[in-house]
Structure formats: C-alpha cells, structure tokens
C-alpha cells in the first residue's frame, strides 16, 4: 500500500499531476509567477478557486511522487518553498506530544484540563491537533512533521526533538523510554524515499540504544532532545535517566521566583527547588530553559520585574533561555473563577507592555535567548482577552519606535541576512553556582550573531552524577546560525568551519584554567561531527570527551 499524507486530497491527484506538468513546462522563476500560472491553469480547466486552490505542499508532493526521478534539477521546490523561518536558526524543530492520561499530578490555578490533551494544553492547538490526528503515536507524529517540513521545502537532515505535554518526569520510565525509542525509529526512516516511492523500510530498533546508534548516521539526525518538566522533579535518578534517553535540554516550569506567588497558585514547588534543579542540570551539562509567567495572582509588576532581574543577575539562576508566558485566563481553570469573583485582577495590556520593554532594555543579557513572548493559544481557548494575540508584534513596534535593541540571541541571529565584514570573536564570562560560564560567539560588524558556544568551567565536582565528567570542562551548547544547510554542503554561515573555530577557542580557554579534558553533551545525531574532531563517546552518561 502506497503512502500518502493523511491530509493530502487523493481525489485531486490526477488534476494535480496535470498542474505540475504545466508548471514544469512553464518554469516559473518565483512564487508570484507560479501563483499566476496556477490561476491560469485553474481557469483553463474550469476549476472553481473558491472550492479548491492547491496548497504548495500538495503540488510538491505530486512533483516528488510522479516527476522528481525524471526531473531532479527543476527549480520548482525553491520556487514553492513556504516561509523558511522554521529553519533559519540552523535546525528544524520537531514538537511531539506525550499521551494526555496521567500527564501531571498538580492542579495549578491557571492550568486547564481538557479532554484528549495533556494538562495545560488544548485540543485545538495546532501541534496538539497533529498529535491527536496521529493518536499520540510518537513514530507517526515525527513522520507527519518530517513530511510536512520536507514538502514545504526545508532540509530535514538536522532536527531538534522537543517533547511536550504535561510534566515529562511524571510519566513512568517504561513509557518514556519506549516513546523516545520510537522517536528515533521514525527519524531513522527515510522520509524522502517514502514520499518519492510511496514505501520504504520502516525502522524498529531492537532497543533504545540500538535506535540511538542508528541515528548517528541516519538521514534525519537528532541534534538535540528537549523535555519539559518541573524543578522539584530534578534529582540524581532523573538526571541519569534523562541522559540514558539522550536528553540535552530541559525546560523548567519555574513560573515565578517569589515563594508567596508559587504558594497561592498551588504550584507545589519553591524557589529553592529551582536553584537546586538549575545547579544540578548545569553541573551535568544540560542546556536550561525557564518558563516565567508575569501577571500571576498576588504578583505585581514590581514582583515580576524582580523575578526577571533575579533570573539573569543572581548566580543561583541564569538560564540559557527563557519562555516569557504572560498569564492568560483560559477556560476550565480556577483562575477564571477567581477573575469572575474579583479575587484576581489581570495585567492590563499597557502594564504588560511596560514590563516587557523594561525587561528587553535593561535586563536581558546577550548570552540568553528569549524563545517566546506569549503562549500561542487560539481565541476559543482564552476566556478573558487581557492583551492582544499579536503582542510580540506590538512590542517589536514599540522597541523600534524607542530605538531599543534587544541583545538576546533570538534578536541577534543572522538568519538569512548577509554577513557584514569583520567577523570577530567575542567572549563573555559570568559567574554561576559552582563555577563560571564562558560564552564565546562570532558576530559581524553589526553584532549579528553567526554562532556561539557555551563553556562551563566547574569549580568542584559537587552535584556531579557521572564519573566521566570528573575534572572536565563542559561544552553545554554549540550552535551555528543561518539558514539550515544539508550535511556536506556549504551555506552563507553553516558548514564554513565556525563551529570548529569555536571549539578550538574553548579548548584554549579550558587549558588556561587548568583543565586537561573537555566534554560535550552531544545530541545523538552530532556524535559523528565530534568524532571527526578528536572526541570519543564515553558510555558513562554518553558524553563526547576529548583529552586536551
């Protein structure tokens, strides 16, 4: 049985074959001319545009299935490529969801519980809808997403796996291990071949370790694996299990650094838990992301600003990235009841804007990334609309108006811009618990970011859970930006040796501080890259280690 994407209109396949043949003959040079030709073809074939206007990925699927092997060099893929923002950070992010049942044991006042969705999520969110369409099967979710990215013209050889849905650490270990194994099995299956030929060999590793081993040289390689959990779930046993799975980044539901706020919202953890979790994760090489929620009950703009200040200025915290999620009043929550009775007053849009401007101007350091500024919820999910859904755009306009340039990584990424002359290395050092972080970055004359490396220099072996890391300097992250380029090819920024240069600089910094070994918490699919630079895989924790 030949494979077809679930949302592909099979009844239109014959019509689409004629359309693709027409486009290949006319050879449009850009998307505008292609769209004009599609309209022309529809009119000539008496096709009602209101009833059906083909998605570009429908056209590309038919091209790959019926024309690609005979006409590989045609420019139609580049012409019909959709917005490339998803791969402009150098990788393609693939989000998948764990099953709804038993997704989190807590009942925070702001958190919704919906049927057929993990706690804190709604079934009409785009990513959750994909999960539901695939019955929360990890293999099928990855396959679905890989197919969509590929048919939208993106390279899918370097992907970042992101597991979402409730509290990952609350699920039993057997379920989590099988879930992650099937993610790797899906990546180890050749999606391009599946699309072109309609069939391929579906991989099913003998074990998690076997699936991970295969991914080291697979067509679709996992450059990282991210999970979401709570600070109070991070301990020695959990960290060891996360490394067994291949996890490289942990997102912590911190929400606030005020214990009174945490108590009132029934969060179930304290600021001390966040400090402990951050230190443990950093000491064992993980990348760290905080979720912060301004506007919670009994908080205020003063308290929220203090949380943001402490997050980046106090040595106990200092995460690598942050998701800034202003509190939203959604259906099915205790918070909605509090709002209706006057027990809770939401932030006004102006107050949130003022806080965000202050945060961007005076607090955000250049070594962190502000991944999100609002939670992407549908209008149907929000019960009380306290700020506009396009708040990020509103903030960006205000920043531009006031000539405020945010120094965070996301705002400085080179993306698809041209590199100005005078690329230089910049090094920033900052203290954290049990050591010093060194942030090495290549920037151009306009301070646009081409790539960076996070190097942690520990002052002791405290909270170290893997013997292989003893007396090691730790590379926690290496990232080269710019549009993603396939492995083996060169781009404007990627695959031009910047990663190797950053590594060499980190070796020198570590040597000067007396370290004779350096370790990397490598994504499974990046191990071959590090092997080529003199690193070897140590089974104890699965770190790539090199003698300096």
Image (tube, rainbow, N blue to C red):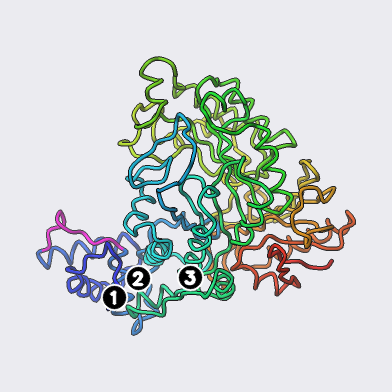
Q: Is residue 54 magenta?
A: yes
Task: Say whether residue 435 is left or right of residue 37.
Answer: right
Q: Is residue 19 magenta?
A: no
Mark 3 or mark 1: name the one nearer the start of the chain. 1
Tell me how far mark 3 sits from mark 1, CA to CA.
35 Å
Task: Say whether residue 189 is left or right of residue 11.
Answer: right
Report the residue marked by disc 3. 185
Q: Residue at the spot x=65%, y=37% of the render? A: 274
Where residue 450 appears, as percent x and y from the top left, is: 63, 56
Residue furthest bottom as drawn: 70
Report the residue marked by disc 2. 76
SS label for mark 2: helix
SS label for mark 1: helix
Q: Residue at the spot x=35%, y=67% of the render? A: 29
- Pointer 3 local density, CA inside 10 Å: few below 14, some 14–19, many at least 20: many
**In the foreground, 336 or 359:** 336
- In the picture, the quarter occupied by the C terminus is bottom right
Relative to 138, does residue 365 appear above or below in the rendering? above
Q: Residue at the spot x=33%, y=61% of the render? A: 31
- Pointer 2 local density, CA inside 10 Å: few below 14, some 14–19, many at least 20: many
Which contiguous range is marked in magenta? Answer: 47-56
Asked if the residue under mark 2 is in contact with the one under mark 3, i.e. CB atoms within 8 Å, the reply is no
Report the residue marked by disc 1. 24
């Amino acid at each position: 049985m030949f494979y077809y994407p679930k949302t592909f209109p099979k009844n239109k396949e014959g019509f689409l074959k004629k359309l693709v043949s027409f486009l290949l003959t006319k050879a449009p040079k850009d998307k505008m001319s292609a769209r004009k030709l599609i309209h022309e073809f529809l009119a000539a074939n008496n096709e009602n545009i209101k009833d059906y206007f083909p998605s570009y990925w429908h056209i590309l699927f038919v091209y790959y299935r019926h024309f690609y092997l005979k006409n590989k060099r045609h420019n139609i893929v580049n012409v019909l490529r959709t917005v490339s923002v998803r791969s402009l950070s150098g990788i393609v992010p693939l989000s998948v969801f764990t099953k709804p049942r038993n997704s989190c044991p807590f009942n925070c006042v702001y958190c919704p519980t919906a049927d057929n969705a993990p706690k804190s999520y709604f079934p009409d969110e785009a990513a959750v809808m994909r999960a539901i369409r695939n019955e929360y099967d990890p293999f099928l979710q990855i396959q679905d997403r890989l197919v969509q990215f590929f048919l939208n013209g993106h390279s899918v050889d370097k992907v970042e796996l992101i597991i979402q849905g409730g509290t990952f650490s609350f699920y039993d270990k057997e379920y989590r291990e099988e879930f992650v194994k099937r993610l790797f099995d899906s990546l180890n299956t050749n999606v391009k071949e599946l699309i072109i030929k309609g069939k391929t060999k579906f991989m099913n590793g003998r074990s998690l370790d076997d699936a991970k081993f295969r991914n080291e040289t697979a067509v679709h390689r996992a450059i990282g694996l991210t999970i979401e959990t709570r600070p109070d779930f991070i301990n020695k046993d959990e960290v060891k299990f996360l490394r067994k799975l291949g996890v490289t980044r942990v997102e912590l539901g911190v929400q606030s650094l005020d214990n009174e706020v945490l108590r009132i919202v029934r969060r179930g953890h304290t600021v001390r838990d966040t400090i402990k979790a951050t230190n443990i994760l950093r000491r064992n090489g993980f990348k760290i992301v905080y979720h912060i929620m301004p506007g919670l009950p009994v908080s205020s703009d003063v308290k929220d600003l203090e949380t943001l200040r402490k997050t980046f200025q106090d040595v106990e915290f200092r995460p690598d990235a942050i998701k800034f999620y202003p509190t939203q009043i959604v259906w099915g929550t205790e918070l909605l009841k509090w709002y209706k009775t006057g027990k809770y007053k939401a932030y006004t849009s102006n107050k949130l804007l003022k806080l965000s401007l202050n945060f961007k101007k005076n607090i955000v350091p250049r070594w962190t990334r502000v991944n999100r500024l609002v939670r992407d919820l549908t209008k149907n999910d929000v019960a009380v609309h306290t700020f506009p859904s396009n708040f990020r755009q509103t903030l960006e306009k205000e920043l531009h108006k006031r000539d405020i340039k945010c120094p965070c990584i996301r705002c400085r990424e080179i993306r698809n811009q041209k590199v100005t002359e005078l690329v230089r290395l910049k090094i920033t050092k900052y203290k954290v618990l049990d050591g010093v972080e060194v942030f090495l970055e290549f920037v151009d004359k306009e301070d646009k970011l081409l790539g960076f490396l996070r190097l942690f220099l520990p002052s002791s072996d405290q909270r170290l859970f893997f013997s292989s890391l003893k007396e090691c300097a730790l590379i926690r992250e290496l990232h080269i930006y710019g549009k993603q380029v396939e492995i083996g090819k060169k781009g404007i920024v990627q695959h031009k040796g910047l990663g190797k240069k950053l590594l060499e600089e980190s070796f020198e910094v570590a040597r000067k501080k007396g370290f004779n070994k350096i370790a990397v918490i490598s994504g499974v699919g990046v191990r071959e890259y590090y092997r080529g630079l003199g690193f070897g895989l140590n089974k104890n924790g699965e770190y790539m280690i090199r003698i300096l």
